[in-house]
Image (tube, grey):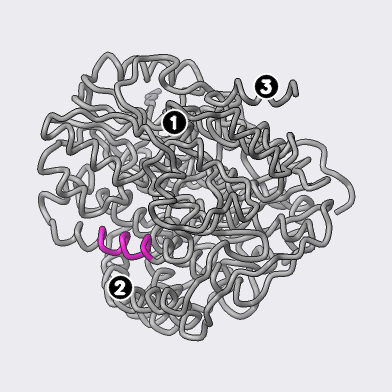
Amino acid sequence: MNIGIFSLSCCEGCSVEFLNMEEEILDILNHFGIENFRLVKEVNKLPVDVAFVEGVPANENEVAKLLEIRRNSEILVALGSCSATGGVLAPGAKPVGHYVDVDHCLYGCPFSRDELKEFLTSIIIDKAFGKKEYSVCMECSLLENGCLLEEGYLCMGPITVAGCNALCPSNGKPCLGCRGSYEDANLKSHAKILLDKGFSKDEIIDAFSLFSHRDLREVIEWLKRR
Amino acid sequence: MVEKKIEIKEITKIEGHANLTIEIEDDRVKRVAFGIHEGLRHFETLIIGKRYHYLPELTSRICGICNVAHQIASIRAVEDALGIEVSEQVKDLRKLMLISSHIQSHILHLYFLALPDYIGVESAIELARKDIKLVKKAFKLKEACNYMTALIGGRAVHPCTILPGGFSKRITKGMIDKYLKKMREIYPFLLESAELFLSLDYPPYERESEYVALRDGRGIPLYEGKIATMHAVFDAHEYGEHIKERAVDYSTAKRSLIDGRDFMVGALARININGKLREDARELANRFGIRFPSNRVAWINPAQALENVHYAMEAMEIAENLKEYEPEKIEVPRTDGEGVAAIEAPRGLLIHHYVIEKGKCRYANIITPTAMNAENIERSLEGYVSKIADEDDGFIRKEAEKVIRAYDPCVSCSVHVMRIGKMSTFL
């Protein structure tokens, strides 16, 4: 099977993170041929079986490029926050799923390497791969970290989709919500809890719109009306 | 009249999307255009109005390679604006992060982007089939650097522990020792890779440039210093008087001139401006007959390899003397102010400038190394291609790509598009 790593407008941190898998890449090469990876390859080809797309289309050429990738790939994976949810670029840009069908999303800014390995393994052994149905908060509790929300920090952990193993809270920084919200997240109730804890409406809107603005648009509008 | 046109629609093995057009008429160069066609990412709409503590998080996303440099430049500009004190210990920890990410970036560039040109393969992936040992070594170095950055920063891409005045977590003596141990472990490989990159056959082209880098009179600073050119030294706060940006119609990225001239930033500029390579690096340069200051453009590559040795020595020295860091409550003396920070990213000088009002960003200007280098890249290409204009297209193309890659351009950085608005006057 062949894979391609494609880059639209973004910081290319996900391409770099892909390369950061270091020696594991050499293992990946035992199962997949890398046919397209502009950051490190001169000869880049289509079609590919699995296309990983990072970034968002920021102009007509990039939309055309995305459509071409979609036409020439069996499976299209939105790689990282920008591609999956719009990420920090969300206020002005639309995620890849707005333009083409996306088969899978790997969330996070950057994506989680463990999750990518999980995904590649699922392809090799032909097993289903799906979005986690629980929150970063859950992962954080399992690690028995102290609760930053209780310590007075504005943490997005309770509504953010798991998969990063609560990296930021484990490092003492509240979750910024870079992965977007999970399916059953109760967004309004989280906003209410934050208001009860004494955060201003403005502070909460600021935090909710840092990443994945689109995902949270409704609750931001609701907050603004309050 | 014989006309030819060499076009590279998508230059590979650089960070981001750029193209090159060379027009030659009767063996003379008529036009060279290094264009950037990556979409603009409107960071100004993202960070204007945002709270100051989010600025490092957001601007980190300008670049996936030099995000540590962006985060640290951003936090320093915030601290400058709001008068936040930073201890020497915090500075040292930040320096350690800068150094490990700096070496990581250089290794990525040298082995994965530049090296294929000099040994005749299309990519490191192809190289892995021929010389798996070499590629494994490069991956090991990268992995080690990422590990070191993550010890302090939580992760290597977009670290998550940097706060105004400090860090969000305790950084134990054990972590510092692990950093030191890892740096000692890779040091022989950094020497070895310097030997490799000092011995390659680089394009001979030389061009006298203006070089610009930080200077502190003691070493080759990454974290802070005055901005020095070959002719002047000035404080970072005065950057606006010297560095002017302009737009060209074939590129989405802005161009910079310093005092009216194109200029070079990055590893070669840093060594040219400062000299002062540490012993082992100096000894290597001497052994391979490389002298600084040098105008040989492609020597950016060996300059990077020497920097790896230089900064690894510096990091070991810092780590040996560092004590455990305990997070503490940070005093933020004011909520309004204007701040500028100039630091050295792997590709060269990086400036972050903010105006903060009521704790929120009201104005931002960020000038990235590739925006500074863009004009210089084009002038060097013009100069070099003029000398080889009578060669065949394939050769010209290859050599032009070598020159572009030597600069290690980072296109993502250059198209972040901060608002270039009216400067506020209270600087």
Image quadrant in which the N terminus of chain B is located = top left
At label 3, which amino acid type do we have? Trp
x, y percentage for residue B32? 48, 34
Q: Magenta span covers which residues?
A: B138-147
Counting every numbered tag in the picture gives 3
At label 1, which amino acid type do we have? Tyr
> Which residue lies under the disc numbered 1?
A182
The residue depicted at 50 percent of the width and 53 percent of the height is A169
The residue depicted at 30 percent of the width and 73 percent of the height is B186
x, y percentage for residue B274? 57, 73
| Mark 3: secondary structure | helix
Q: CA distance from mark 2 to mark 3?
A: 54 Å
x, y percentage for residue B166? 62, 66
Q: Is residue B227 left or right of residue A165?
A: right
> Which residue lies under the disc numbered 3?
A222
x, y percentage for residue B79? 72, 60
| Mark 1: secondary structure | loop
Q: Residues within 10 Å of mark 2 (few under 14, many from 20)?
A: some
